[in-house]
Image (cartoon, helix red, strand yellow):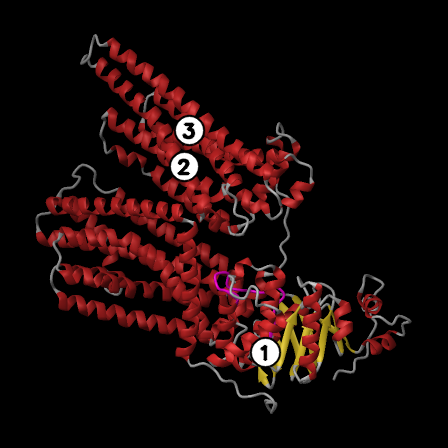
Amino acid sequence: MIEFDNVTRTYARKVAVDGLTLKVLPGELCALLGPNGAGKTTTIKMLTGLLRPTAGSVRVCGYDLASDVRRATHAIGYVPEEPFLYDKLSGREFLEFAAEMRGLDRSTVNDRIRRECRYFELDDFIDDLTETYSHGMKQRLVFASAMLHDPPVLVIDEPMVGLDPRSVRMVKDRLRKLAAAGTIVFMSTHTLAIAEEIAQRIGIMDHGRLHFLGTVGQLQSELASSHTSLEPLFLELTAGNNGRLRKGMDCKLEIE
Amino acid sequence: MRPPVLSSTPPPDFLSPQQEARAFGRARNRTLATLLRQTFAHSRFRVTLVVVLTSLLWGGMFWMFTDGFWFLESMITQPDTHAQAVGGVFGAFFAALMLMLIFSSGIILYGSLFRSREIAFLLTIPARTERVFLHKFQEAIVLSSWGFVLLGSPILLAYGVVSASPWYYYVLLLPFIVAFVYIPVSIGAIICLFVVHRVPDNRLTVLVGGLVLLAVGGAWIAWGLLTGPRNDLLTPDWFQEILGRLRFSDYRLLPSWWLSTGLLDAASGAWSESILFFSLMISNALFFRQLALWQAGRTYRAAYSGLYGKTMRRKRSRPMRFDRLLSWLLGPLPAAMRLMVIKDLRLFRRDPLQWSQFLIFTGFLVIYFFHIPRFTYGVSSITWVNMVSFLNLSVVGLLFSTFTTRFIYPMISLEGRRFWMLGLLGVPRQTILWSKFFFAAGGAIVPCSGLVLVSDLMLGVSNLIVISHQLTCLVLCLGLAGIAVGLGAWLPNFRDDSPSRIAAGFGGTLTLVVSTLYILIVVLLTALPTHFYLVAEYANLGGNIQGQTGVQWWLGFWLVAGIAASLILGAIATLVPLRIGFRALQRMEF
């Protein structure tokens, strides 16, 4: 389970995340949406142990990210928006390092690498140096490295950036399957169509606060809108001076 | 109360510290092996160049120190005073290195522990925080050690040779150096972690304050040494006076004193005392390393998290009067070129890494020129004064060539990533190169000519030399700017976004070598004929070579021909690389 318990994170005087309380249960695919500067990336960074909350606590599978960061990060597979790879390692060497750090033994490492190579179609370039990869190839490799140890929690920051349509389909199918098998998938995205297509719950953040959490249907009834797709609902909620949030509309949230 | 752990989550199978170290070591070794393989396969010329230049530098230092130690031995026949003198030299040298190592390792570790993208990856995997710290700490040790080995080994080996040291002196050298390096690097790490954790808002103030203290301390010591008694130069009293001023390095709690004393004991055959100092160094090295590790375990993640918000704070730029003044001064240039020069200056000014390195270079130059009067040592010989004046000209040229290699050469490479914008503006590509050229040459001519003029006035050289120097300086500035801009466009590196890494690449190395050769040739073309012409004139005034007007005529002709040749060479060095750069830029696709 992912638990944000009244989490606040400030940068000097700016409040990046303001009193976030949220629970994501096993088998759930939850997408966090919001305009630029809404606090999504800060939320993700706190969830992966990079940043600590100024107040409140973040727990993954019961482990507090501040006091038990190793156990918590062991339970997470993380795909950042801008993937980091060692330029002078091949894709296989990078996967071996990632798997080894998760405590997998040699034969399991080889089996899992084979499995991920097959799924993400990495075989053609897995033994090339990662400095020669395109952005999409890097992104697929990072997805593979995040899934090598079958983590109970998968955290993804902008999952589809740089991926071609075939890879997008591949990733979407995999995320659905993982959620169906009990994995928590928590992602932050600007691609509303992807969130609408695969997420079971959608969270909408703006100015550091979570203003909505639920399904698209719930959002439609919250806003009493005639629109049925996510994009106009999202824009209605957040955009410009006409957005409901800017007018001080109070969204009644049913969290959990 | 902590909520219960989900039953579906298996207990983490963590690696032991040894397994973790092996996993990190394996990844690092693989990276290193690939890097070496690539370097030897694709950059042989660069490797050869680096090896040759490093060997020359090392050999030059070894020769200089060997000569220096022979000189000391011949000048100070009293064994006690000799031992004191060598101890003073070693102590001061290692104390200075220790201070520099504390600072450099602190800065290196700040970059690698808090600003690198690799760290953002490593902190999200279940590695021990201490292991992540150690991974970067070991890199800092290697980065610091190689500079120490390059600078310290010639002096230590030279001393071993001159004092006919026993074999174990040479065996102990490397372990002593490694143990020593651990201490300042650990102290640098502790300071870095403390500053980022406790005073993240004032980290720049702490750094600048430390650098100012270091500079003031260094200048005070240098001043003390260089303002010593002049008349009884190199006499026993003079040595005693200088040794007295080096006494600060004699403090018994300084690791630099343990190092110098331990090595000198080994050199004199007192191996048991040497081993005692070595044990002292090892135990302190391990203690400080452990202290840094303990501190990292407690504060590193919190410091990283705390700093994150500080580095992403929005910065607002304000228009500066200087920009308006510059825009007015550059009025005669076409508008596009003027705007690009101002843009380059703004980018440079707003990048602290760029201008701090610029300030360090400038600091060296100022210190050098500050001590010009010392070079005369009361010697009135015209040949010596002329030699020093041309040496100054070469120094200005060489320093400007490091400026152009470090700051101007990478400009086109850095422009490459935003070239789409310049390309769409409809500005001819030649304009881009010309703007870089004006930026480099225009920014250099006034300070370089000024420095050379000041040095000439301090040395009291003749008007002919002053004019010759100003002309040569102009030729040097234009040529060096042309070489850096032209080669920057011909051999760009669009893969790196760090100017220092771009400058350290093949193109940067080639720029530095070509620039150095250019300076040497231009200075020799003007220096030699001017020197001989003046010597002849001086002798003529004294009545030594009266009647030899033929010789003087030939010397005059040589002088004019030399100046003309340097002008032609300057024009070639300015225009040919620029032309090559224009063509390369025209062909380039973005």
- From the viewer's perspective, tell me whether residue B513 is left or right of residue B580: left
Residue extent of the magenta highlight = A77-91
Q: Considering depth in this image, is B301 or B137 the residue closer to the camera?
A: B137
Q: Residue at (49%, 73%) from the top-left corner?
A: A96
Label 1 is placed on what type of residue?
Answer: Ile
Whether tag 2 and tag 3 are in contact, CB under 8 A, the answer is: no
Q: Considering depth in this image, is A79 or B205 the residue closer to the camera?
A: A79
The residue sitting at the right extreme is A226
Q: Residue at (58%, 71%) from the top-left corner?
A: A117
Q: Which residue is disc 1 drawn over?
A: A76
Q: Is residue A53 visible?
A: no
Q: Residue at (26%, 15%) from the top-left corner?
A: B537
Q: CA distance from mark 2 to mark 3?
A: 17 Å
- From the viewer's perspective, tell me whether residue B460 is left or right of residue A235: left
Badge 1 crowding class, 10 Å Cα cut-off, few under 14, some 14 to 19, many 20 or more, is many
Q: CA distance from mark 3 to mark 1?
A: 62 Å
Q: Percent from the top left, x then y, of residue B377?
A: 23, 34
Q: Which residue is disc 3 drawn over?
A: B473
Does A82 appear in magenta?
A: yes
Q: Which residue is disc 2 drawn over?
A: B514
Q: CA distance from mark 2 to mark 1?
A: 53 Å
Same subunit, tags 2 and 1? no
